Image: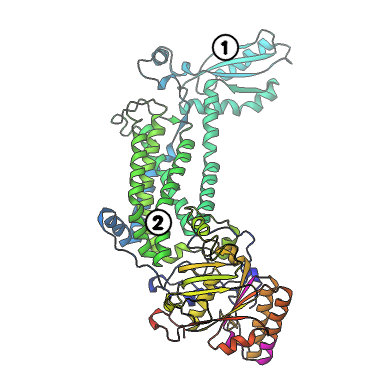
């Protein structure tokens, strides 16, 4: 089951090289993907942070195991909060979704309109005049409609307008037609229509729709193309247009949040849950605003001046402002959870420790914004009140019910799956160092190990997740006074080979994966091809290739093959990896290839590659040093690194020999 270098993955290697928590077991490898080769071709080469490892649908490469920092206990008010919401996460999720769904139900009756004099203060001159007209003439006289059209082609424009006026006056919802006449030049006809309802009433909107529905019949009968206009009709049109823009606008902002959060957190679950939570917050805010400003529930207690509809711009403003605040709260909380997960590898504990570390900031920010918005509600302008109320309700709902209750429960329930992303999507999306930590680390290593150094690999005290404590022998560049158990210290020049022996198969593989930017480095300093790891892990993967020589059929999905066929498949993978022209080639399991002819073919392939690219560096792992050296072309300078011969069985993943 061979794959091209761009289609392959080392998911199986990462699973074997890192301990899997029992409660958060990783899913299986993607079918049809061969983990035997990892070319890591990535032309972008963007920086990544500490969790800079290539996620895969079948594995999470950012969960350090060995050398991980234990998750601290959570205490205090917010510790109790997060323990409560994650104790039974399914129950928390159901309760929050049902509560917000119930709050969103009234939003179906949300009515939009532009403000008129009827929304002014009761003692304002415009409001006094509005009320007098309404009391003595009727509500429709405050918002007359104008029907107009070209009548220049008519021989009798006055008679034509009289006939049109009579027909319009007979329509349901029309109180009067005080004017139906052509203008002085006789080229334009004007009909003034007084509706039965107020300017912002549903009856008036229905009358406008009815007048427009007669357009074609009047065009055929009178030869006049009529239009309905005036302040009232324009307000109805603007409200309808803004209402129709809500769905496209919502899809735009939700789509942007999905893409941006996926780029930042390298996850599918985080952006999806964030977008779903935002949608719930907006819907609930709309529902509560409708309940107060349309249905009038609690309007007197809040000092609401007018009910029945809200200003047409409210939904767009609320969605835009709440989107920015909601994503701020999301990043505050989830970034700390992601940092905790990268440190201790426990997805569930990371939710709690990350929550406690950022909940105070989110709470303070939400209270500040809530106080600002709610201050405009009592006694405020009638046009501002629904916007302010909706934003205040939206902030409170999003911060305390969605970000601090629903999201922790969802991420706790998902466990390790919350921090994974399909490899193809990971390659397609750019990478961002949001906090700037990766940039700071890269700058710190810019002149290390010395200014102008051109090492293929420079490592000092490197410890790797899943590899145990790494020791090296005298051939590696380890100072005599250093503790050999402190980690790998070695400098590998272009064209040289590093032979890694000893330890367990999982430990050797973990070390090679980490040296290629494919597993986290939990301690020490490391640059590969001059790039700092992990900050430039994506670029390192694009410059290196990883081949498992012991992986005949790693997925176990294909039919059983003979030993010769298996060895030939390994050779094919090596050739495919070399075709990508990597600057460093990592070969794991060099002693697994038994056929002498295949070993000779592997050595010839490496010899040809070195002849074509003399700067190609090799890193070869094998239990037996002789087996590793036998694969290297003659004359290749060799540095040896020996892992401890005995490993702590408790540190090894289950099933690893």
Q: Nearer the viewer, residue 2 or 290?
A: 2
Q: Position of residue 77 (x, y in %)?
A: 26, 53
The one nearer the camera, 560 or 232, is 560
Task: Give the extent of the magenta segment.
Answer: 583-600
Reading the chain from its start, which is encountered first: label 2 or label 1?
1
Decide: few, some or many residues near mark 1? Use Cα within 10 Å; few <14, some 14-19, many ≥20: some
Side of 607 where 300 appears, left or right: left
Residue 530's spot in the image, x, y percent?
A: 59, 64
Viewport quadrant of the N terminus = bottom right
Residue at which label 2 appears: 336
Q: Is residue 424 visible?
A: no
Q: Is residue 401 above or below residue 153?
A: below
Location of residue 80 in the rendering, given as x and y in whole percent from the top left corner? 27, 57
| Residue at left offset 45%, top offset 26% | 201
Q: Which element carries disc 2, helix, strand or loop?
A: helix
Tell me where residue 179 appears, x and y as whole percent: 57, 11
Q: Residues within 10 Å of mark 2 (few under 14, many from 20)?
A: many
Residue at 31% of width from left, 28% of height from top? 303
**Label 2 close to label 1 by CB (< 8 Å):** no
Instruction: Check the image and name the residue furthest to the left.
Output: 76
Q: Which residue is mark 1?
A: 179
Q: Residue furthest top?
A: 184
373 lies above or below 533: above
Residue pictured at 40% horizontal, 83% vertical:
649
22 drawn magenta = no
Q: Relative to the observer, which residue lies in front, 407 or 474? A: 474
């Amino acid at each position: 089951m061979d794959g091209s270098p761009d289609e392959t993955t080392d998911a199986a290697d990462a699973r074997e090289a890192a301990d899997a928590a029992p409660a958060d077991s990783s899913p299986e490898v993607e079918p049809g993907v061969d983990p035997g080769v990892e070319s890591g071709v990535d032309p972008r080469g963007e920086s990544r942070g500490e969790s800079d490892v290539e996620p895969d649908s079948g594995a999470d490469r950012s969960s350090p195991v060995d050398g991980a920092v234990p998750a601290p206990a959570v205490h205090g008010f917010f510790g109790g909060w997060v323990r409560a919401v994650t104790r039974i996460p399914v129950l928390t999720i159901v309760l929050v979704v049902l509560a917000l769904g119930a709050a969103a139900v009234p939003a179906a009756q949300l009515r939009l309109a532009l403000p008129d004099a009827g929304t002014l203060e009761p003692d304002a001159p415009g409001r006094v005049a509005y009320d007098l007209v309404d009391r003595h003439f009727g509500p429709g006289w405050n918002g007359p409609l104008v029907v107009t059209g070209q009548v220049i082609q008519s021989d009798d424009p006055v008679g034509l307008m009289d006939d049109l006026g009579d027909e319009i006056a007979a329509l349901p919802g029309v109180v009067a037609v005080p004017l139906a006449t052509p203008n002085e030049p006789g080229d334009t006809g004007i009909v003034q229509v007084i509706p039965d309802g107020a300017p912002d009433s549903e009856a008036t909107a229905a009358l406008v729709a009815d007048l427009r529905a007669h357009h074609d019949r009047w065009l055929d009968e009178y030869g006049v193309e009529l239009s309905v206009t005036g302040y009232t009709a324009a307000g109805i049109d603007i409200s309808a247009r803004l209402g129709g823009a809500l769905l496209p606008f919502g899809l735009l902002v939700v789509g942007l949040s999905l893409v941006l959060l996926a780029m930042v957190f390298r996850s599918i679950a985080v952006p999806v849950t964030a977008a779903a939570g935002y949608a719930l917050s907006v819907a609930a805010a709309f529902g509560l605003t409708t309940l107060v400003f349309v249905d009038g529930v609690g309007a007197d207690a809040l000092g609401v001046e007018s009910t029945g509809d809200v200003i047409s711009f409210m939904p767009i403003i609320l969605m835009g402002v709440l989107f920015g605040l909601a994503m701020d709260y999301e990043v505050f909380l989830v970034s700390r959870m992601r940092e905790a997960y990268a440190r201790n590898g426990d997805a569930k504990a990371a939710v709690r420790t990350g929550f406690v570390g950022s909940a105070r900031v989110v709470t303070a920010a939400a209270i500040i914004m809530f106080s600002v918005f709610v201050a405009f509600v009592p006694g405020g302008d009638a046009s501002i009140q629904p916007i302010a109320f909706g934003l205040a309700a939206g902030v409170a709902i999003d911060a305390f019910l969605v970000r601090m209750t629903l999201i922790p429960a969802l991420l706790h329930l998902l466990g390790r799956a919350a921090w994974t992303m399909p490899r193809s999507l990971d390659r397609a999306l750019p990478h961002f160092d949001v906090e700037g930590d990766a940039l700071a680390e890269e700058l710190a290593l810019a002149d290390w190990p010395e200014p102008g150094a051109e090492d293929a690999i420079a490592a000092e005290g490197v410890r790797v997740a899943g590899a145990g404590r790494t020791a090296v022998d005298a051939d590696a560049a380890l100072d005599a006074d250093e503790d050999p158990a402190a980690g790998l210290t070695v400098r590998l020049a272009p064209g040289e080979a590093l032979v890694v022996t000893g330890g367990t198969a999982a430990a050797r593989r973990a070390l090679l994966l980490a040296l290629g930017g494919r597993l986290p480095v939990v301690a020490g300093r490391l640059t590969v091809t001059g790039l700092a790891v992990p900050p430039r892990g994506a670029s390192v993967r694009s410059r290196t290739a990883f081949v498992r020589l012991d992986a005949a059929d790693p997925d176990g999905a294909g039919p059983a093959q003979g030993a010769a066929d298996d060895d030939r498949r390994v050779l094919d993978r090596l050739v495919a990896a070399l075709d990508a022209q990597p600057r460093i080639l990592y070969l794991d399991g060099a002693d697994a290839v038994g056929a002498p002819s295949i070993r000779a073919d592997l050595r010839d392939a490496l010899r040809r590659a070195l002849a074509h690219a003399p700067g190609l560096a090799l890193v070869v792992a094998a239990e037996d040093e002789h087996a590793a050296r036998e694969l290297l072309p003659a004359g290749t300078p060799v540095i040896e690194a020996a892992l401890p011969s005995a490993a702590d069985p408790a540190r090894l993943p289950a099933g690893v020999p």
